[in-house]
Each structure stands twice: as structure tokens, then as C-alpha cells.
Image (cartoon, rainbow, N blue to C red):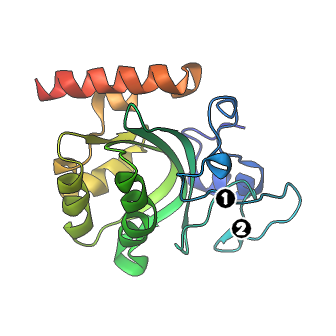
Amino acid sequence: MIANFARPNTIFRLLHTLEPHYNWRSFYTAEDDDRSPFHGREYSEFEFTDALYDHVLHPQWDNFGSATLYMKLLYADYDGHYAIIELIGEWNDLLYNDIMLLKRDIIDHLIHEGITRFVLIGENVLNFHASDEEYYAEWFEDIEDGWIIGLNFRQHVMDEMQDAQLDWYINFGGAFQQTDWRTHSPMDLCDRLNGLVMRRIG
């Protein structure tokens, strides 16, 4: 089920039915990748163990320590240095320091494995609450000639990120707001997004 651009209160009611993108599993599964931070994880289709407030989440999402933000590593290409991460929930740096958890437990692991190009799919990120820039700046510095893209984030989430000056570190808006990513293979999507970044830089 696709919840893109649905109202947040509608998504809350549907959380238990919203699965991470499934059609790329023929290309990659994080639980079978021995270089992934989620290697060896097992998933149930019937037991709901994680929740956003009092709304349970589909069990295919991964908990990385946040109280309100969950993720799925949809794709990692170590030769191309790409990772695609789908997010769901509320991104709250102010109360829960979500960026610290994401950076320390997931991103640092992937950077160590050679990933320098990150795609964050944010259409199901319902709200964003900023704190400081420290971990975003560190992430940006750690990947040197790489990049971070925020794909299809909601307008009010992008506004909050821009107000916090995170657009210094994350490419979002414009062409990155109009990408029908599900119609592409992950390899094709990464190549297309890399081209968009290069044009934006140029």
C-alpha cells in the first residue's frame, strides 16, 4: 500500500498495513547482506512489536533505537557506494536525538562499508523536529565527495529542515520532490539521482 501524500491522521490509522517497498527484494535484502547493520534479522508477518505512539507498525520495518522513527534499508550497492533507506514515523531530533541514533548505529556502519551516497525516502515521515546541526555536518564531512538526498519529503517537513539549515547537508525539494521512485530499479534510481545532484552542483 502506498501512503504518499496521504494526510498524517490517515497514515496513523493505516500504519499496521504500510509495508516498506517490497518490489526490490529480488535485488537486495538487508537481512541477507553480511555487510548490512540488519544482517541476520528475522521478521514476522503476524507479530506486531513496534509502534508509533499507540499505533502499531507493520513488522517489516526496522527499529534502530528511536521511539518514533523507523526505517528499512531497501538497497545497498557497495561498488557504486549507494544506499537507499525508506523512513516512516516522526523524525524528532529535539526530544529523542534521532539523527544521533541514525548516524551512530546505521550511517557510520554503512560509511565504514564504503557507502557515500545516501537516498532517504521520506514520504511517510509525518513530522520533523529539529535540534542542532552537529550530526548532519559530521555525516556530510564523513562522505567527502558523496551526497545525501531527501526524496519526496512532505512540504512541511522540508520547511522545518530548511529552517534548521539542513539543506546545507541534504539535497531535497525541486526535482527530488517529483521522483516516482517505485517505477525504477534501485540501480537506475541511484544513477538518475546522481545525475540530478551533479546538475545541481554544476
Asked if residue 187 lies left or right of residue 1, the reply is: left
What residue do we see at 54% from left, 20% from top?
A: 184
Location of residue 143 in the rendering, given as x and y in whole percent from the top left corner:
24, 49
Mark 1 lies on residue: 12
Residue lying farthest to the left in this orientation: 202
Residue lying farthest to the right in this orientation: 46
Residue nearest the viewer, comparing 152 with 160: 152
Residue neighbourhood size for the residue with mark 2, other residues' Cα within 10 Å, grouped as few (<14), some (14–19), many (≥20)? some
Per the rendering, the mark at residue 55 is 2
Query: Separation of disc 2 and disc 1 at Cα?
Result: 6 Å
Per the rendering, the mark at residue 130 is none
Does label 2 or label 1 sit earlier along the sequence? 1
| Residue 116 figure quarter | top left
The reply to whether the C-beta atoms of the residues labelled 2 and 1 are less than 8 Å apart is yes
Location of residue 138 in the rendering, given as x and y in whole percent from the top left corner:
21, 62
| Residue 2 figure quarter | top right
Instruction: Inspect the image, locate mark 2, and give the three-letter code of the amino acid beneath it.
Output: His
Quadrant the C terminus occupies: top left
Asked if residue 103 lies left or right of residue 106, the reply is: left
Instruction: Inspect the image, locate mark 1, and give the three-letter code of the amino acid beneath it.
Output: Phe
Residue 182 lies, with reference to residue 131, above or below; the image says: above
**Is there any visible trace of residue 117 in the rendered image?**
yes
Residue lying farthest to the bottom in this orientation: 95
